[in-house]
């Protein structure tokens, strides 16, 4: 039974482009057969509490001897890690907020990045259960971040997620990107609006293709 774990983090529940594209992926996934399951976690509608104790950045054996983190948060951490490890494919909607990821998504990252459990620490061969697992990031950005522009390197969400998911967890990462999503709202020139529509159409097509390929 192939399982897709879909995470949405956009605060826009009506016109969000990232939500629309992840929905295209998830709908295509479901269409592949009744055995194709989608586990959907909406990080904006049901935000995770931020970690209240630094000890939770490590498993029990690597914590200070006097550590006493919240039992409730520790249980939640185990649920989130189990949910991730059980998934065959990870799909994340990543709108760019203030040049980075939404804090709700960062909270999820803080729970699931656990040295010696999901990321290598002292026995890499047994501590990277997600190695090679596909992760698809749907990145939507309101502005222009084309190569050669002054804002080319202003996206600090994808590099951080790549560092965690690909480098630390060993997942196989692919990205679907749509930019200029605010062009119509703020009266951008017609050619920029046209580029936005082209990028959105291409992003939806890429999402459907990726779902069929990975499913």
Image (cartoon, rainbow, N blue to C red):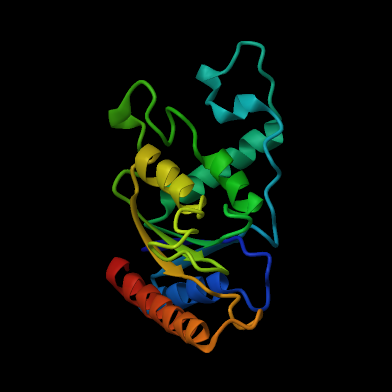
Q: Is 175 placed above or below 100 here?
A: below
Instruction: Give x and y (percent) for residue 200.
Output: 46, 79
Q: Nearer the viewer, residue 3 or 20?
A: 20
Q: Is residue 121 visible?
A: yes
Residue 34 shows in this picture: no
Q: Position of residue 119 (x, y in %)?
A: 41, 34
Q: Is residue 31 left or right of residue 57?
A: left
Residue shown at the point (71%, 32%) measured from the top left: 52
- Residue drawn at the location 59% of the way across and 46% of the way down: 106
Left or right: 80 with respect to 37? right
Q: Residue at x 34, y 48 (%)?
A: 171
Which quadrant would the C terminus be assigned to in this image?
A: bottom left
Which picture quadrant has residue 37? bottom left
Report whether 50 appears left or right of 201: right
Q: Position of residue 189 (x, y in %)?
A: 55, 85
Horizontal arrangement in the rendering, residue 36 relative to residue 144 (left or right): left
At x 50%, y 43%, the residue is 81
Residue 207 place in picture, x, y as percent: 39, 73
């Amino acid at each position: 039974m192939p399982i897709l774990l879909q995470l949405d983090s956009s605060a826009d529940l009506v016109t969000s482009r990232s939500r629309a594209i992840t929905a295209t992926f998830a709908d295509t996934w479901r269409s592949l057969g009744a055995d194709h399951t989608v586990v959907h976690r909406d990080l904006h509608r049901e935000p995770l509490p931020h970690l209240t104790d630094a000890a939770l950045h490590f498993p029990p054996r690597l914590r200070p001897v006097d550590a006493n983190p919240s039992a409730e948060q520790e249980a939640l951490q185990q649920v989130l890690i189990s949910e991730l490890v059980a998934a065959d494919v990870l799909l994340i909607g990543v709108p760019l907020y203030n040049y980075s990821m939404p804090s709700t998504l960062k909270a999820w990252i803080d729970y699931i990045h656990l040295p010696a459990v999901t990321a290598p620490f002292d026995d890499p061969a047994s501590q990277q259960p997600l190695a090679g697992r596909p992760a698809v990031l749907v990145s939507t950005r309101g502005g222009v971040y084309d190569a050669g522009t002054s804002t080319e390197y202003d996206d600090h969400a994808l590099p951080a997620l790549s560092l965690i998911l690909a480098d630390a967890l060993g997942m196989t990462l692919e990205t679907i990107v749509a930019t200029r999503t605010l062009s119509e709202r703020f009266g951008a020139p017609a050619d920029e609006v046209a580029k936005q529509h082209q990028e959105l159409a291409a992003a939806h097509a890429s999402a459907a293709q990726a779902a069929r390929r990975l499913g």
